[in-house]
Image (cartoon, helix red, strand yellow):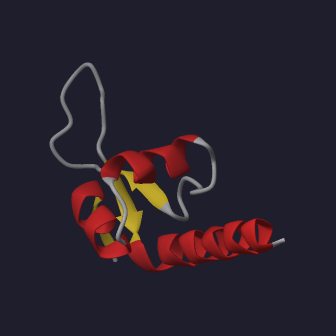
Amino acid sequence: MWISAELAAEKLGITEIQLSFLRENSLLKPGIHWKSSPYGQKKPWNPKALYNINLCRKVIKKNYLEESNNIAA
């Protein structure tokens, strides 16, 4: 259910930078769309994010449709 940023970006058809942008701008919510990886943590703590691909896809489709409608208007 939870996959790496690299794999999530590939499956969603976006870049890892775009995926990070969605997360950092609160379109993807912590604990719902993404969570911190519990594996391989070192200090200083800089966790990698894991993503729920199905829930992320819904957000991306919704935002894409809204953008398309705004452009068409």
Q: Quadrant of the C terminus?
A: bottom right
Q: Residue furthest right?
A: 73
**Above or below — where is 43 with respect to 21?**
above
Q: How many marks?
A: 0
> In the image, 33: left or right of 68?
left
Tell me the quarter of the picture where residue 66 sits. bottom right
Residue located at (58% from left, 77% from top): 61
Q: For this view, does 57 lie left or right of residue 71?
A: left
Quadrant for residue 7, please give it: bottom left
Is the residue 41 above or below the residue 69 in the image?
Answer: above
Which residue corresponds to the image point at 73% horizontal and 66% vertical from the top-left?
A: 71
Q: Is residue 55 above or below residue 37?
A: below
Q: Position of residue 15 (x, y in %)?
A: 33, 55
Q: Residue at x 76, y 73 (%)?
A: 72
Residue 40: x and y in percent read: 15, 42
Outermost residue, top side: 44
Question: Where is residue 57 shown, x and y percent of the image?
Answer: 49, 76
Q: Nearer the viewer, residue 69 or 39?
A: 69
Viewer-nearest residue: 48 or 64: 64
Q: Is residue 61 above or below residue 16?
A: below
The residue closer to the viewer here, 12 or 47, is 12
